[in-house]
Amino acid sequence: MKVEQIYTGCLAHAAYYIENNGEAAIFDPLREVAPYLERAKQDQATIKYVFETHFHADFVSGHLDLQKKAGAAIVFGPGAAPEYEAITARDGQIFSVGNYQVKVIHTPGHTMESTTYLLVDENGKEHGIITGDTLFIGDVGRPDLAQHVVADLTEEKLAGHLYDSLRNKIMPLSDDLIVYPNHGAGSACGKMMSKETTDTLGNQKKLNYALRPDMTKEEFIEELLTGLTKPPGYFPQNVLMNIKGYDSLDEVKARAFTPMSPTVFETVANETGALVLDTRDAETFAKGFIPNSINIGLEGNFAQWVGEMIPDVTQQILLVTEPGTEDEAVTRLSRVGYDHTIGYLDGSFPSWKADNRPFNTIDRVDAAEVASAYDENSLIIDVRKKSEYDSEHIINAVNIPLNEINKHLAEIPKDKTFYLHCAGGYRSMIAASILKQRGWDEVIDVRAGFEALKETNLPKSDYVCPTTLL
């Protein structure tokens, strides 16, 4: 059976494409649908269905644009109630894609409408399961997201449902089935996902902690909920967009692709209160940037950090990009629901500088310089996750995770120079730009972060294996 995984690393997201006898189906598509349309065109196939495993929280799906552009029918599992034309399938219902069959297996737990799709080949042999966020490789979906949309769906209730779904619907299936999950390592939808993006169900029964056959429901709930951190603020907003609908990506891009001179850019920023988002790399940004802009570089987990650090998906945004990357920036913003980019600086930052406009810089130093200047009065702020800090850190460094920095501004002195670092220099520049925007002028960013600091003579804690990846 031909199943093609289309993996997008920056979101740790997997969509799936199947095709047989001139008919195709897409499972859990990303916002931009051109790659799926092109893939079907290569096979001279018609996209018959778009199957959704659930209302996604970490990205905005492309199902509506596929419905519009390909005429595909959207399929959700039992209990879904989207506010647009779609099929709400019955548990056990079978859909045909050419000579393939797709069987609906309702597996509530991550969300109540969560559904697994069993793939059956042209010979009637069960091939694999597309599990969405019900079952990952090495983990299962977190059960604490739906309560941010429906208060009665507590994480304990959903965890109990997930236990039942796994035991009664998934684990009885054949060991040789291939598991095709919606996410891999790096996604915030689970806490211990493997870097592998497929596996056999039999192997997962042996290795996945959540599939231990001797677990009671109470033990499962306790283990599943232990170590969960608060989900990013944009998650419930993306869920509502996936339920209610959204503007076509074509419309989003039409609004966003408005080049602006420095004069117009500044005027629009002042009149609209738009956030100036600079997507250049950290090293380039540090050497010069528009005052009050923040840096989230395209070269890292851009969409995830936009979602973490910009709380409202309706925030208007003005972009400063490397020339030619405007389309990539707008596309990646739209994947997580940030549809209100209203323009970009024509000619990027060099045009701003050439116009003799004021700009800021951020000091950035190598780890060796930090080590040579370090004494007992030095302040180092580590913006990595708590689990990263707990595993190993510079002695006396203060841990303020990047996604919590706005809650801890009162703890950061404005009258003292301090060093800021993450693992490799990406997250710390986001933090540095935010602090600079809010009036901190004594921040020094550490180039290459903790990976470089480890090679110096700075005192470090002993390595401790973290208990969670979140």
Image (cartoon, rainbow, N blue to C red):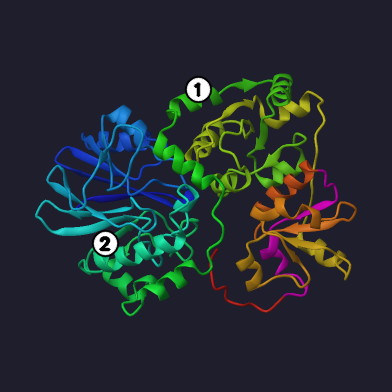
> Is residue 448 magenta-colored?
yes
Is residue 363 found left or right of 141 in the rendered image? right
Q: Report the residue at 49% width, 64% height from top.
A: 191
Q: Look at label 1 and name its amino acid.
A: Ala
Under tag 1, what secondary structure? helix
Q: Are marks 2 and 1 in contact (CB under 8 Å)?
A: no
Quadrant the C terminus occupies = bottom right
Q: Which quadrant would residue 35 be assigned to in this image?
A: top left
Q: Which percent across, then down, holds residue 340?
A: 56, 30
**Which residue is under mark 2?**
178
Please report the residue visible at 57 percent of the width from the left and 33 percent of the height from the top: 314
Q: Which residue is nearer to you in this view: 87 or 1?
A: 87
Q: Is residue 1 left or right of residue 136?
A: left
Amino acid at dot 2: Ile
Q: Furthest residue to the front?
A: 152
| N-terminal-most mark, 2 or 1 | 2
x then y, percent, for residue 143: 43, 59
> In this picture, which residue range is highlighted in magenta?
439-460
Relative horizontal placement of residue 439, taking residue 238 as reference (left or right): right
Q: Position of residue 53 (x, y in %)?
A: 32, 49
Q: Which disc is residue 254 wearing?
A: 1
* Residue at screen point 81% across, 67% down: 371
Q: Residue at x 62, y 34 (%)?
A: 321
User: Can residue 209 be seen from the camera position used here?
Assistant: no
